Image (tube, rainbow, N blue to C red):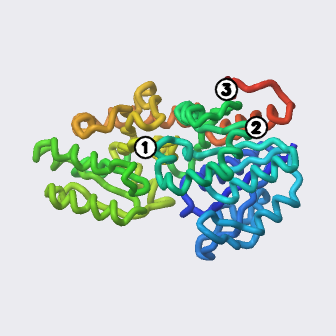
Amino acid sequence: MKVLQTIQGLSASSGGPSTCTRDLLEGLGDLGVSVHLLTTESADSREPNLGKGSDWLIEVPNDYKTPLFFSANLQRALAESDYDIYHTNGLWMYSNHITCKMARSKKKPYIISPHGMLYPSALAIKRWKKWPMLKLWFNKDVHNATCLHATCKQEMEHCRTFGYKGPIAVIPNPVVFPKGVKAVINKPEGRKQIGFLGRLHPIKKVENLIYALTLLSQEEQNGLSLQIMGKYDDCYEKFLKTEVKRLRLDDCVKFVGFVSGKDKYDRLSRLWALMVPSTQENFGMIVPEALICGTPVYASLGTPWGELNEYQCGWWKDNEPQTIAKVMLEILSMSEADAVAMGARGRKLMEEEYEQHKVAGMMNDLYKWVVGECAKPDFVYTL
């Protein structure tokens, strides 16, 4: 059984799908699964594709054109390929459409991992642009897929709402435990640091963290430091900074900018809690990254993280400022021992349910089922 995955971009700046796809491919490789990933070379020589030089990575010269990233090189490579299963990551790009189209022409099964792109909030973004693409290509691509891969049951429900009636495999993103990152207490003296980490985009509702701070007393505000880590939408970032200044919160809200690598994990380990107030969120890698650092997480009901309550390693609540303010008060009253215990439970959750090779094994079982080599796995849902 040979599998070919595709993705539009695999550099770190391409976002979360790049990282989790790389981690999945490396996990599958460790298990001895014959799988490759096809993409173009990075357009920025200073930022090569993740996994550059790996046996599983197939790169063709970057010839992307138009906003859909049309690529004759990708088309040619797919036409000349011969795999048992084709598996594309994402939607709305030419690499996704041509993978599905080529698989159908070769009469081979194909899988789509939408990576949250069928959520209602995602479909609403630039709907004027996506509507004709759905009519021309992507409705056919999605509805004729052999299987969809959702990272959580919430995403599966949105795939059903979209109208897909075929099998859906619910397989989380793999979690890699970087060397040296342990669930340890590493909190600086003084104010308790809480933080947001991710793209600065209106759907993230970072302003609700700011508004929650205004509901605390001056003394309570003096006990917290909100670290806002990330970049993306300059207009939204300007709005957030304007609100901080207007509400006179400059002393307890800090904008850190983009962070990555060891610096990211060091900053996460210094937080008393990661704050994820998004209106809607797919699996998202930042929650696991915080939990493996031993940092509790607050996440909104728009995220698929009910296990934060179940495992008592954080808070899964609505994203109203009043609710967030109550969580902040809990953090202020939390002892170091409480933080250590919550962090240990969060890391245990990641080890038991989301570890890289466990998830890779699930994907391998999905592949084997698709080609008829095993019975339907329990995580594959059919109507």
Q: Is residue 24 left or right of residue 85?
A: left
Q: Quadrant of residue 159?
A: top right
Q: At which x and y percent is residue 40?
A: 71, 66
Q: Quarter of the image for the C terminus: give it.
A: top right
Instruction: Tell me which numbered mark, 1 or 2, is placed earlier along the sequence.
Output: 2
Give the SS element for disc 1: loop
Q: In this view, does 242 lie to the left or right of 104?
A: left
In the drawing, what numbered circle is on residue 127?
none
Residue named by callout 3: 381
Q: Distance between the residues labelled 2 and 3?
A: 13 Å
Q: How far apart are marks 1 and 2 (CA)?
A: 43 Å
**Which amino acid is tagged 1?**
Val
The residue carrying pointer 3 sits among few (fewer than 14), some (14 to 19) or many (20 or more) residues within 10 Å by Cα, namely some
Give the SS element for disc 3: strand
Asked if one can make out residue 354 in the rendered structure from this viewpoint, the answer is no
Asked whether disc 1 touches disc 2, contact meaning CB atoms under 8 Å apart, the reply is: no
Q: At which x and y percent is residue 370?
A: 80, 35
Residue named by callout 2: 146
Q: Quarter of the image for the N terminus: give it.
A: top right
Q: At which x and y percent is residue 214?
A: 16, 46
The residue carrying pointer 2 sits among few (fewer than 14), some (14 to 19) or many (20 or more) residues within 10 Å by Cα, namely some
Asked whether disc 1 touches disc 3, contact meaning CB atoms under 8 Å apart, the reply is: no
Residue named by callout 1: 184
Above or below for 16 versus 303:
below
Q: In which quarter of the image is residue 19?
A: bottom right
**Which amino acid is tagged 3?**
Tyr
The residue carrying pointer 1 sits among few (fewer than 14), some (14 to 19) or many (20 or more) residues within 10 Å by Cα, namely some
Asked if one can make out residue 73 in the rendered structure from this viewpoint, the answer is yes
